[in-house]
């Protein structure tokens, strides 16, 4: 299996925590003029409504989507800058060409909750 470009690996590492986040981001990117609701995304991606809300908020905080106009329940794809736009484009291309590699990269990251729990049992020298 051919490795992903380092910038894509780093982008995933820093920004994508689940396949559903990735799928939501790429679906919204594919139709950037559409204002998506959780209902729209749950129908297309088979998400739970509560998961969808969390995903949209996460993507908004990361600067990948924004709320659409006066309706706070609708979101549109909108990368915060051209560098982010370019990285999302590269991610989309990588997912199209090497889906397994992208999914593997997402799920090879240590789960923060598990890591935090494991770190609690580390022995450290007193300063």
Image (spheres, rainbow, N blue to C red):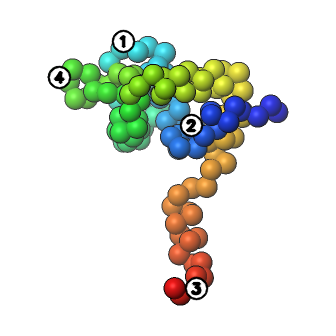
User: What residue does disc 3 label?
Assistant: 125
User: What residue does disc 1 label?
Assistant: 33
Vertical placement of residue 11 versus 82, above or below: below
Pick whichever, 11 or 75, lies toward us: 11
The Cα atoms of the two marked residues, 2 and 3, are separated by: 34 Å
The Cα atoms of the two marked residues, 3 and 4, are separated by: 54 Å
Q: Residue furthest left?
A: 70
Residue 62 coordinates in the image, percent (x, y): 40, 38
Counting residues from the start of the chain, the first of labels 2 and 4 encountered is 2
Residues marked 2 and 4 touching at CB (< 8 Å): no
Counting residues from the start of the chain, the first of labels 1 and 2 encountered is 2
User: What residue does disc 2 label?
Assistant: 11
Q: Can residue 28 be seen in this view?
A: yes
* Element type at mark 3: loop
Counting residues from the start of the chain, the first of labels 1 and 3 encountered is 1
The Cα atoms of the two marked residues, 4 and 1, are separated by: 15 Å
Q: Counting other residues with Cα less than 10 Å from the Cα at mark 1, is it few (<14), some (14-19), or many (20 or more)?
A: few
* Element type at mark 2: helix
Residue 22 coordinates in the image, percent (x, y): 53, 32
- Residue 2: quarter of image: top right
Residue drawn 76% across the image and 34% down it: 3
Residue drawn 51% across the image and 85% down it: 127
Q: Which one is in front in this view, the residue at disc 2 or the one at disc 4? A: 2
Left or right, 95 with reference to 77: right
Q: Is residue 103 visible?
A: no
The Cα atoms of the two marked residues, 1 and 2, are separated by: 24 Å
Residue drawn 26% across the image and 22% down it: 68
């Amino acid at each position: 299996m051919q490795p992903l470009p380092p910038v894509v690996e780093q982008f995933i590492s820093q920004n994508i925590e689940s396949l559903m986040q990735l799928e939501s981001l790429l679906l919204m990117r594919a139709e950037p003029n559409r204002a998506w609701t959780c209902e729209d995304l749950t129908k297309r991606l088979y998400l739970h409504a509560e998961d969808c809300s969390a995903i949209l908020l996460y993507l908004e905080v990361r600067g990948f989507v924004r709320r659409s106009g006066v309706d706070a329940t609708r979101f549109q794809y909108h990368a915060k800058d051209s560098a982010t736009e370019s990285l999302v484009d590269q991610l989309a291309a990588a997912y199209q060409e090497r889906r397994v590699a992208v999914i593997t990269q997402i799920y090879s990251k240590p789960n923060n909750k598990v890591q935090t729990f494991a770190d609690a049992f580390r022995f450290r020298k007193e300063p």
